[in-house]
Amino acid sequence: MKEVEKVGSIVIVGTGMTLGAHITPICRSHIEQADVVFTSAHPMMEKWIQTMNSDVRTLQKLYAEGKDRRITYREMVDVMMAEVRAGKKVVGAFYGHPGVFAWSPHKVIEQAREEGYAAHMEAGVSAEDCLYADLGIDPGKVGSQNFEASQFMFYQRNIDPSAYLILWQVAIAGDKSIKRFSTGKAYRQLLVEMLNEYYPLEHKVALYECPTLALEPPRIDWIALKDFAEADISLITTMVLPPSKKMLKNQQILDRLSALDKKFQ
């Protein structure tokens, strides 16, 4: 890492998932003290952030139907870095946790540091945090696996059906173009077929959406896996698959541990 000598700086903060409820004091402080704040969040969240700083600029306008999202993400980095290079104290305020399913926040920090500017990230409440709370899941009980749905489809992954499986961005499952905001029933049916290697078609799965407003309930719809292709989903829908099998004991290791216990007692 290069020694920091330059005036400009950038801090990437998380606004949390629910408007006004999840933002941490340190994230709010960074927003209030910034020279310029760039936002990528729900429109209502962006308006709320505007009450904290007089110079708030949205990054959402960089998205467009049919536009490669990788271009959008690169543009986000470019517009933020332009202000950092101008010597300003810059904040990037991103929905949820700014480092989860977000390329631009990580990249802009990397680039700023390479150029000699101070840069770091502050955590925020993520959709995964809310999911565990709303569905009553303790990931430490049987384990939890998280995959972006398209990545799960594109690569050979080893799934443990005795743990929870969480698939993110299922609305664009199978999208290789990085341009669409949804794929379709045929793509989701292919995902169902892949999952059927580990889970029965009648296996109950949850479709989860975290609320933006505190007075709204979360979406938690339980359906059979076989019905997923026909389900009503959006860009924020996450699929949660509970375990379909019990954990199997590793008796060989348990026996060795017992021998160690006897040895060191």
Image (cartoon, rainbow, N blue to C red):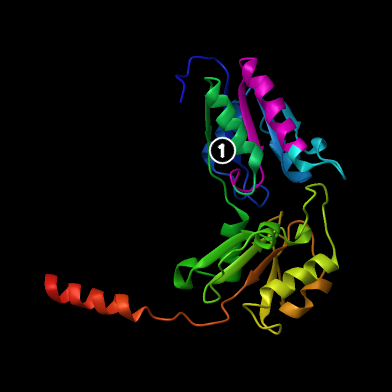
Residue 23 placement (x, y as % from top left): 59, 45
Q: Which quadrant of the structure image shows residue 115?
A: top right
Label 1 Cα neighbours within 10 Å, binned few <14 / some 14-19 / many ≥20? many
Q: Quadrant of the C terminus?
A: bottom left
In the rendered image, is residue 257 in sight? yes
Question: In the image, is 252 to the left or to the right of 3?
Answer: left
Q: Is residue 63 left or right of residue 4?
A: right
The answer to which image quadrant residue 50 occupies is: top right
Identify residue type, mark 1: Cys
Compare residues 176 and 89 and report the one nearer the observer: 176
Number of labelled discs?
A: 1
Q: Which residues are magenta?
A: 71-99
Position of 185 relative to 97 (above/below): below
State the image coordinates of residue 87 (x, y, percent, origin top left): 61, 15
Viewer-side residue, 47 vs 226: 226
Q: Circle 1 — which element?
A: helix
Magenta stretch encompasses residue 227: no
Residue carrying label 1 = 27
**x, y percent for residue 81:** 65, 24
Q: Is residue 217 above or below residue 252?
A: above
